[in-house]
Image (cartoon, grey):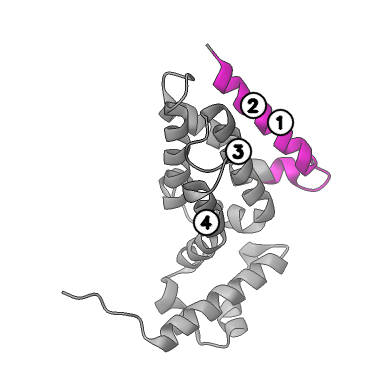
Amino acid sequence: MTERKPRKDAARNRQALLEAADDLFGRSESPEDLTMADVAAAAGVGKGTLFRAFGDRAGLLRALYEARLEPVREAVETGPPPLGPGTPPQERVPALLDALLCFKLDNRRLALALEENGGTSPYGTAHYRWWHGVLRSALEQGPGPVDAGFTAHALLAATRADLVEHLAGPDGVPRERLRAQLADYAARFLTAP
């Protein structure tokens, strides 16, 4: 069976919806107050079109998050050091965590809305599994901890959206200090006996 290509208007509508959602979430102080109707209206399409394209609010949030994450993912998979493959773990692990922290800082509202949406665990999401796999693989290449899988989970816990929001929220820790603290935390894992 051949895979059907989406109609041109469906692809155009999907792109318009992603752009509208990106703009609305970027400007909103309270993303949980944004409705599917708000996004559809901003894109100039009906709510039915939005639901056909993404299924539900969680589907829209995931698609928007993935679209914003794509440049980071590309840098991690094919980029030069320190993010790219082939970099020694002592350099790559802190660089991966820094890239994720910066992504979450730059996309705080969206990351928080995505991780809080629904009753499902963020640990089962595709983007979490991807980050965990990349980090675990980097840890396995070095002389670090025995259980790279657990260590990857422990390191990723420091970048959860709710923790990032708590630390960086109003009157919070400045961005560069957070980055330095995370680098120090990662270094401790990499040098532990």
Label located before the other in sequence (2 or 4): 4
Kind of residue indicated by mark 4: Asn
- In depth, the one of 133 and 171 nearer the eye is 133
What residue is shown at x 48% (from left), y 78% (from top)? 14
The residue positioned farthest toward the top in the image shown: 193
In three-dimensional space, the C-alpha distance between marks 1 and 3, rounded to whole angstroms, equals: 13 Å
In three-dimensional space, the C-alpha distance between marks 2 and 1, rounded to whole angstroms, equals: 6 Å
**Residue range highlighted in magenta:** 165-192
Which residue in the structure is indicated by mark 4?
117
Label located before the other in sequence (4 or 3): 3
Query: Which numbered dot is residue 95?
Result: 3
Q: Is residue 185 within the magenta segment?
A: yes
Q: Is residue 118 within the magenta segment?
A: no
- In depth, the one of 131 and 42 nearer the eye is 131
- If the image is split into quadrants, where does the N terminus sit? bottom left
Q: Circle 3 sits in a helix, a strand or a loop, which is it?
A: helix
What residue is shown at x 40% (from left), y 78% (from top)? 52
Q: x, y (%) of residue 80? A: 55, 45
Query: Which numbered dot is residue 185?
Result: 2
Which residue in the structure is indicated by mark 1?
181
Kind of residue indicated by mark 3: Ala
Q: x, y (%) of residue 170? A: 80, 48
Q: Residues within 10 Å of mark 1 (few under 14, many from 20)?
A: few
Q: Residues within 10 Å of mark 4 (few under 14, many from 20)?
A: some
Kind of residue indicated by mark 2: Tyr
Query: Which numbered dot is residue 62?
Result: none
